[in-house]
Amino acid sequence: LDSNSELIDKAAEGERVLVAVENSIDGMVGESIRRIRKRENVFVNMEVYYPINLCLGGMENSKEEELEEIYSHPKALGQCSEYLERLGANKIPTKSTTEAIGMVKELENPRAGVIAPKEAIEKNGLKVLKEGVQDEKNNYTIFWELSNRKGKGGCTALIVDLIDKPGALYEFLEPFARKGINLYAIHSWPENGKYWFLVKVRCSNEEIPWKKLERKAEKIRDLGSYSIKSFL
């Protein structure tokens, strides 16, 4: 039942956890990235690509067309927004799909449903009412395996606060281009009238031109190097 933020706090305390950071339909999981930004001793050890097949679940006597409330994590609800709009039921956000399943079981209301993976619905004694309700069939989520120790691998993630001036992002990225390092993701978040960035590059920590980058940024948070594992 732990939220992403709670899992990240456990990683800072020494546990190894798996946290969702991005979905192919619904984008970045802001809660995860913002929490990682706040915890200086949390590092990425692996990036995992996992296909997500979301299903509609309910009580044994529930019927899809009679559901009035659908419970799930906001990201799961977002991945099924077109389907839920057609269904016309009220969306009830929870801190996890596991919590949503538990709430529907406790309610024992045939008009209450849940959006969650098929395995989780069946494992917890609910009935799968409809499979594959996500808006895109090739839906997948990117997870980070986190701990309080730096990992090893061929990719590295950085959280960067840039100097507030024209061309700041271009100047920060230029050293990567000069060294032939490929950036495979860059995301920005607003904060106090400025932006900070998550940058993911295809090279190990040791290959990054740290001295040049430090001269072009206010602050760089090194999330460490990691390997990538795909189940797609």
Image: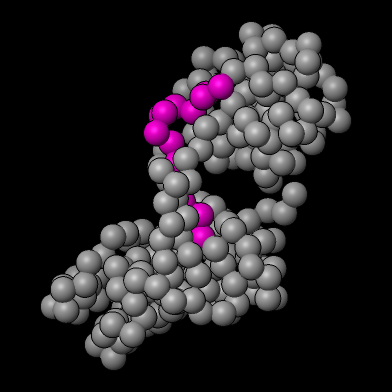
Is 100 above or below relative to 229?
above
Tell me: residue 206, above or below residue 102: below
Residue 141 lies in the magenta-colored region: yes
Left or right for 213, reference 113: left
99 left or right of 197 in image: right
Query: In the displayed structure, would residue 210 be above or below residue 60?
Result: below
Q: Quadrant of the C terminus?
A: top left
* Front residue of this view, candidates 49 and 164: 49
> Can the viewer see residue 95 in this picture?
yes
Front-most of residues 30 and 6: 6
For this rendering, which residue is in front, 155 or 95? 155
Q: Quadrant of residue 39?
A: bottom right
Q: Is residue 200 magenta?
A: no
* Boundaries of the magenta span: 131-144
The picture places residue 180, in percent across and down from the top left corner, at 16, 73
Colour mode of the rendering: one colour
Residue at image location 56% in from the left, 79% down from the top: 149
Residue 22 x/y as whole percent: 46, 50
Q: Is residue 28 left or right of residue 35?
A: left
Question: Which residue sits furthest left?
Answer: 178
Residue 227 appears at what percent x and percent y?
42, 66
- Furthest-bottom residue in this view: 211
Quarter residue 209 falls in: bottom left
Q: Which residue occupies 47% across, 40% down? A: 51
> How far across and how far down the image is residue 150, in percent?
51, 79
Is residue 171 shown to the viewer in this render? Answer: no
Name the residue at 79% across, 28% down: 125
Magenta stretch, main secondary structure, is loop
